[in-house]
Image (cartoon, rainbow, N blue to C red):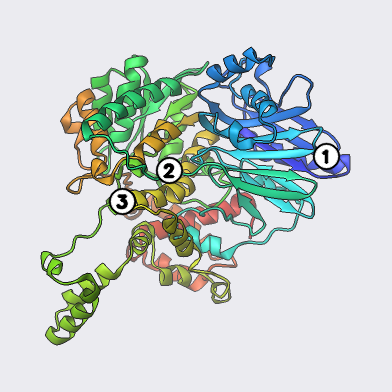
């Protein structure tokens, strides 16, 4: 787990040195165990290292092939590297380390002109760059799910890439322009959705894609996508048995490391199941949770009881006041505005975990695979509508509402007229469009495209040709909120604290298995993740397994009203935010005067944006 970056194109040596120094400095927090680089007349690559496998100097990157004509820098973990290494050594390839990443160099030699063949051999999470010295060709690639980030700028015959956005912007290699629509989408969602970034000139390489650059030409290819069901569906009992065997194997793979491994543990199904399976292979594994003692939102009590039952060595980060405790440190290196409050809790327990381990298993992805969110429950129609042809329902309800004056009929009409994409947007949006636009200076609103994100969702939804409604919506989650929000949170907060976060649910083997199952195996009678709950019930009992999902809830709003330190921190930040030119200062004055009347998501988003602007000296 590391940071990678580089520049491609002809530069004066002193300019290339300057750019590489800037990139490595911007990624230092991702690699506290060392930094090394490669340079020639056409390319410069830099790697900051967090040592996980092969802790010796031989594990330092860049890695090279036998004649040093292929250069690799990689961020991530390859879980099937031992199998691949055995195959490659049998073909005559020679290795210089015991690192998992080195297999990629030699796979490239075997599949130089077929990157898809290389990438589809890898099981793991990764973002890597390969420089082919003789061909003067760059290959950038990102894992299937998008667990590891990768961003790039291509302009004037040059290409710059990095694990994070801000290091590219800080190089000064090209003028950068703020994308106001991205800032709008940040307020809408709490994060900036790809493939766009805060800057118009910088883009993220999307999940399951690779980029090649040669002779000034840049091409991007999708090599993998979440599969649609083959309709070769086994019985529920057989599917349950297959899930349990596969998940157990995946947990075993994710526990491989040359450093101590732990697990995040909340009161939820996903982290509890990971821990229950992991503890069978790693008795007494360290577990970590965040706790708000005495608060209704506190999951610490249930997590501690689960840890006791499973026999883990449990640690809790407890907080009883000052919601923004350690906020400055945890959000210091956020490369784009981000405002999910759970990121702060994750940062704190990552900091706690780093005192004991260097790798932590996280439960991200279970909801997106097995329908765990409330937004995965579709609105139910009243039974009387089944007697009315679908084509006539809208008109008849409209007439009925007018004739009877029953507003409920009009509400029902609007509800059934909404598409699944409309429902998805409504449920993931933190605020309404007009409220968000009111936060911007009037001249800025004219430059915001409020339809960009909805249009992206509609395009993605149309790619799913099957009739399984739940799996089509889960696909939207996998391609948008999972990558842009959940995986961004896990990557940034773990890397900020010098640990590697591994996500067993997002192993592509499990993703492909889950999307080949019908939706009614996953969600029944308003309850999601049925198969995961059944598995957990075998491990830890039904009480925990079928506990109602609560999601992450924080006492932020309550503490803002009752805890002076929290309240003053918010007000101070909102007052500072009035100086951000793109925001509407008068609207912020109104918000400061009525904190109770504003959604906590908007307040937290403003605090985070102000902090980001101060940290980056932007605006």
Quadrant for the N terminus, please: top right
Residue most extreme to the bottom: 403
Mark 1 or 2, closer to the camera: 2
Taking depth in this image into account, of 31 and 546 the one nearest to the observer is 546
Mark 2 and mark 3 residues within 8 Å of each other at the beta carbon? no
Image coordinates for residue 383, horizontal then vertical, percent: 11, 64
Quadrant for the C terminus, please: bottom right
Taking depth in this image into account, of 597 and 515 the one nearest to the observer is 515
Tell me the element at label 2.
loop
Taking depth in this image into account, of 95 and 594 the one nearest to the observer is 95
What's the residue at 67%, 40% (across, down)?
26
Tell me the element at label 3.
loop
6 with respect to 367 (left or right): right
| Looking at the image, residue 414 lies above or below residue 372 | below
Image coordinates for residue 135, horizontal then vertical, percent: 80, 36
Residue hosting label 1: 42
Image coordinates for residue 169, horizontal then vertical, percent: 68, 51
| Looking at the image, residue 313 lies above or below residue 163 | above
**Among the 4 quarters of the image, the one containing residue 45:** top right
Residue hosting label 3: 468
Mark 1 or 3, closer to the camera: 3
Mark 1 and mark 2 residues within 8 Å of each other at the beta carbon? no
What's the residue at 28%, 70% (across, down)?
417
First in sequence: mark 2 vs mark 3 = 2
Crowdedness near tag 2: few (<14), some (14–19) or many (≥20) residues, C-alpha within 10 Å? some
Mark 1 and mark 3 residues within 8 Å of each other at the beta carbon? no
First in sequence: mark 1 vs mark 3 = 1
Residue hosting label 2: 227
524 with respect to 598 (left or right): left
First in sequence: mark 1 vs mark 2 = 1
């Amino acid at each position: 787990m590391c940071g990678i970056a580089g520049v491609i194109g002809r530069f004066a040596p002193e300019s290339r040195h300057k750019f590489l120094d800037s990139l490595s400095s911007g990624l230092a927090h991702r690699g506290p165990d060392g930094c090394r680089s490669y340079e020639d007349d056409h390319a410069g690559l830099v790697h900051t290292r967090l040592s996980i496998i092969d802790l010796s100097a031989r594990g330092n990157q860049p890695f090279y092939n036998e004649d040093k004509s292929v250069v690799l820098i990689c961020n991530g973990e390859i879980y099937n590297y031992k199998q691949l290494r055995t195959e490659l050594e049998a073909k005559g390839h020679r290795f210089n380390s015991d690192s998992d990443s080195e297999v990629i160099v030699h796979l490239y030699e075997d599949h130089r002109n077929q990157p898809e063949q290389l990438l589809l051999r890898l099981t793991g999470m990764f973002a890597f760059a390969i420089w082919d010295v003789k061909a003067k060709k760059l290959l950038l690639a990102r894992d299937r799910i998008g667990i590891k980030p990768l961003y790039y700028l291509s302009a004037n015959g040059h290409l710059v890439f990095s694990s994070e956005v801000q290091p590219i912007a800080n190089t000064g290699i090209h003028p950068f322009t703020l994308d106001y629509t991205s800032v709008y989408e940040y307020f809408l969602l709490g994060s900036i959705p790809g493939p766009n970034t805060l800057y118009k000139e910088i883009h993220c390489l999307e999940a399951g894609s690779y980029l090649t650059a040669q002779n000034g030409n840049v091409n991007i290819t999708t090599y993998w996508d979440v599969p649609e069901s083959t309709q070769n569906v086994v019985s529920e009992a057989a599917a349950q048995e297959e899930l349990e065997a596969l998940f157990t194997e995946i947990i075993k793979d994710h526990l491989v490391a040359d450093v101590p491994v732990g697990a995040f543990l909340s009161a939820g199904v996903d982290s509890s199941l990971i821990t229950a399976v992991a503890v069978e292979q790693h008795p007494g594994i360290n577990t970590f949770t965040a706790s708000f003692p005495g608060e209704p939102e506190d999951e610490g009590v249930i997590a501690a009881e689960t840890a006791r039952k499973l026999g883990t060595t449990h640690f809790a980060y407890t907080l009883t006041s000052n919601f923004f405790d350690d906020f400055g440190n945890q959000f210091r290196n956020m490369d784009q505005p981000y405002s999910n409050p759970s990121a702060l809790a994750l940062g704190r327990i990552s900091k706690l975990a780093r005192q004991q381990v260097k790798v932590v298993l996280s439960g991200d992805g279970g909801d997106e695979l097995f329908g765990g969110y409330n937004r995965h429950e579709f609105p139910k129609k009243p039974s009387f509508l089944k007697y009315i042809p679908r084509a006539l329902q809208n008109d008849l309800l409209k007439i009925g509402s007018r004739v009877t004056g029953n507003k409920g009929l009009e509400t029902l009409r609007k509800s059934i007229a909404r598409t699944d994409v409309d429902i998805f947007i409504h449920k993931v949006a933190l605020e309404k469009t007009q409220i968000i636009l009111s936060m911007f200076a009037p001249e800025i609103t004219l430059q915001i495209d409020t339809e960009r994100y909805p249009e992206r969702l509609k395009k993605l939804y149309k790619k799913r040709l099957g009739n399984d409604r739940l799996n089509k919506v889960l696909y939207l989650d996998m391609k948008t909120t999972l990558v842009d929000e959940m995986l961004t949170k896990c990557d940034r907060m773990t890397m900020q604290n010098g640990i590697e976060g591994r996500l067993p649910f997002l192993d592509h083997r499990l993703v492909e298995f889950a999307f080949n199952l019908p939706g009614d195996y996953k969600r029944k009678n308003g309850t999601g993740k049925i198969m995961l709950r059944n598995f957990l019930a075998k491990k830890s009992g039904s009480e925990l397994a079928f506990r109602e999902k609560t999601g992450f809830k924080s006492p932020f709003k309550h503490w803002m009203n009752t805890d002076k330190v929290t309240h003053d921190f918010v007000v101070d930040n909102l007052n500072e935010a009035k100086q951000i030119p793109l925001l509407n200062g008068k609207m912020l004055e109104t918000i400061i005067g009525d904190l109770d009347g504003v959604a906590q998501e908007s307040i937290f988003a403003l605090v985070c944006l102000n902090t980001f602007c101060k940290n980056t000296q932007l605006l």
